[in-house]
Amino acid sequence: MPTAMDLRLLLRFPVEFVAADDPADSRFVFHTPDGDRTATANEAVGPLSQGIRVMSADKSVRAWATPAILALRIMARGALGSPDATELNQLQNAGAAVGPNAGAGQASINAFLKALAVDAPAAASTPQVRQPYVSPHAAPQRARETTFSWTLIISFLEEPTPSQAAVVRLRVHPRSGSFAAFGANDLFNGSSHPMAQDAKEPTAAMLRRLEPWWAAAATLRDPHARGAVTVGPDDLARLGDRALAPTLMANRIEVRWPPELVRELSTTAVIQRKETPGSDRPSAFTQGQLFSFDWQVALGSDVLSHAELDQLAQSQTGLLRLRDRWVFVDKASLGKVLAERSRDITAIDALRAAVTGELEVDGRRTDVDTVGWLEDVRRRLAVQDRDIQPGRQPSDLEGHLRDYQLQGLQWMTQLVDLGLGGILADDMGLGKTVMLIALHLQRAVETTAPTLVICPASVLGNWEREIKRFAPGVPVHRYHGARRSLQDVKDGFLVTTYATMRADAEALAEHEPGWGLVVADEAQNIKNPHARTARAIRDIPAVARLALTGTPVENNLSELWAILDWTTPGLLGTYEQFRRTWSRAIESRRDTERATGLSHLIRPFVLRRRKSDPGIAPELPPKIETDHRVNLTREQVGLYEAVVRSTMAQIEQAQGIQRRGLVVKLLTQLKQICNHPAQFLREPEARLTGRSGKLAVFDELVEQIVSEEGATLVFTQYAQMGRLLTRHLDENKIGNQFLHGGTTVRGREKMVHAFQSGQVPVFVLSLKAAGVGLNLTRADHVIHYDRWWNPAVEDQATDRAHRIGQTKNVQVHRLISEGTIEESIAELIRSKRSLADAVVNGGEGALTELSDAALADLVRLKR
């Protein structure tokens, strides 16, 4: 169920009302760039009524605002089933604007009213009896035009009982800007508030209208209640019932829930490996290994256990106390989630989900998370190209591997260890053969199983020569000609041709002790999936299969499918599935989105380097680093000194783990103050300009970079600070985006593409979420808004821009608050090497062991 806030955010998008044969199935549909969002008539009527006051509202939303307002008025007086002639005429006139023509618009209005009646409370269709109220002490009243709105403010009891959960206080808001709001208590205690007497009758009338739907309103009308009522969970939950929302809106009543109430029910599809005997081995993508799919439910950031889900399911209203907090969730949404059950999925489905972040569930694509061992696999597969850490050259390999060859070795090792295969698609001459030989030597430490190399006859001799040259102690068997034999092949290499393999496929498949690796050199020879060669090679089992080719696609995408379906069976589905899902759209319609999706899916399994790639030859342009020392504002100085003073007093009295916790808390708070007071004070909507020295320097840097048509990355270790920066940039009309730990795989890709293609000049990134694994070479500036304890982490982040493919000088800006903990740490790293090593390796934890005097000197504000 979308919240009112969700729907208000959708008002800027086009909306249409889709009527169904059954009014209960009718929906408002908001057409957003991320897909259609739907809402029932009762969910949408309130937010739509605000459409005429929202500057950014779409014209279709403005058209529906009038019918929504009229409907709320009709429901408020209980006439939903029988509007009067004037109301019907107004609705019919309004219908002309909501459809392509007057007739269609009026039909939509009629369907809208029927849909409202489906889940509206009975009182919406029951005429309300208005009883005029006359005070026995009534005095002549002067005429006033002022109307009122009201707020029901909820405060949870510290020790709730089954019958008493919270206090609801009524507050009155004169709709004239000349008067402030006041508590309903002032209506009954003889208050001198100038509007108290005028508000008395409207408030009583409002409560009488509300009483049929919310019984506690009767108590609020009692003068002895003094404008407050204690309610139980059921009455409290009624205020959050979506069926009551139109009534509250029609009567200008706002319900203000406590900030500690948890209302967000989030579901995440999760895939993990099922632990079975022997499943701790690294090669888990094997036949028989099972993976499970399940829904993980969280309230806020807390993942719920099955027992807690049962508690929620048993709640009649969705409101209950859980983990010492009040929780209020939509029962319909919860029921839908609880109806889903854990299921087993195949290893190849789990692999695809780990790579793409998606899984097809009940016929629709669903974003999924991976956990445990599978999450580790996802992270390993996500590291690609130049981010791959070079492997270690085997000691018995003759010769010296270059860095890119060591990376290729590591890439193949990782896939083989997982029981997977891949395509090494480097240009000819970059050493694919020697990398494969190195892989065999590396694996020989753990297994003596031989490696089968299948190649064209023209390179058979070359393979023999290369093996003898780079691995002179390894047996190499030539399996070719009339006298060929498998009798002595127990280890080392067996080299044969495609023709021989095709003729002896059965003997090669049954050979003992089996093959550790099967390698297809010049793998374009198996690009035709229907040819005898391609069918024969599929019958030869192995721990892993690798294809070597400089041209994985020569004519069409079916060639890529054929090779990958041999190295990693099932990854791309069947041939027909591949054509239906990928090749037809890409080859016939030039669908770039599909091409990008396919590229993302196969990227971990295809390593392609060209001779012209900048990572193999030319030097990178220079990296210029600048430390910008900034002064704290007066507000920052006050906060900094107050935190140091109060926390150091606690630290001096604490010991052990309590002291260490206080030190970490102190360091974190001081770094947040250096960033911006709004971060430390948890003020996400507060004014930002003029309160932080760092932000002032940041503005100068960004303004200059943007004016010079440059692009910059902005790293911060705090997601909260990242959100403040993006809000500030939005207010200054500077294009930006923010990548953090909660960004989905698909979202990361979209952001990277948007930045690299020049759509936004400023890319704000969470240091931990984006410090590795991204290629952002469009940036010619990198701003480190706050300092990390380990400079290597900062360097890794900087390398998102200063990397192969960068053609411009990269300016690195570090913002350091002068005289603060940030400057102390920078000086410490330079001047005290022994302690610096501890800080670099241990971060904040190393500083928890400093003496009180040393710590006080470290955090003291130096002027």
Image (cartoon, rainbow, N blue to C red):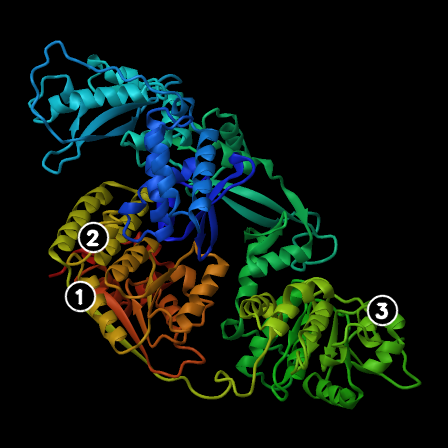
Relative to 566, say whether 847 is above or below. above
Indicate which disc residue 482 carries. Answer: none
Along the viewing direction, whichever of 293 and 11 lies nearer the viewer: 11
- Going by the numbered disc 3, the residue's amino acid type is Ala
Q: CA distance from mark 1 to mark 3?
A: 70 Å
Q: Position of residue 436 (x, y in %)?
A: 67, 78
Along the viewing direction, whichever of 595 and 450 lies nearer the viewer: 595
- Going by the numbered disc 1, the residue's amino acid type is Val
Q: Which residue is mark 1?
A: 630
**Residue at x 30% of width, y 42% of height:** 50
Q: Residues within 10 Å of mark 3 (few under 14, many from 20)?
A: some
Q: Is 19 placed left or right of 859 in the picture?
A: right
Marks 2, 3: nearer the viewer: 2
- Name the residue furthest right: 482
Image marks 1 and 3: residues in contact by CB distance under 8 Å: no
* Position of the C terminus by quadrant: bottom left
Secondary structure, mark 2, is: helix
Marks 1, 2: nearer the viewer: 2
Q: Which residue is mark 3?
A: 509
Q: CA distance from mark 2 to mark 3?
A: 69 Å
Q: Earlier in the sequence, mark 2 or mark 3?
A: 3
In which quarter of the view is residue 177 placed?
A: top left
Q: Which residue is mark 2?
A: 677
In which quarter of the view is residue 182 placed?
A: top left
Secondary structure, mark 3, is: helix
Q: Residues within 10 Å of mark 2 (few under 14, many from 20)?
A: many
- Going by the numbered disc 2, the residue's amino acid type is Pro
Q: Earlier in the sequence, mark 1 or mark 3?
A: 3
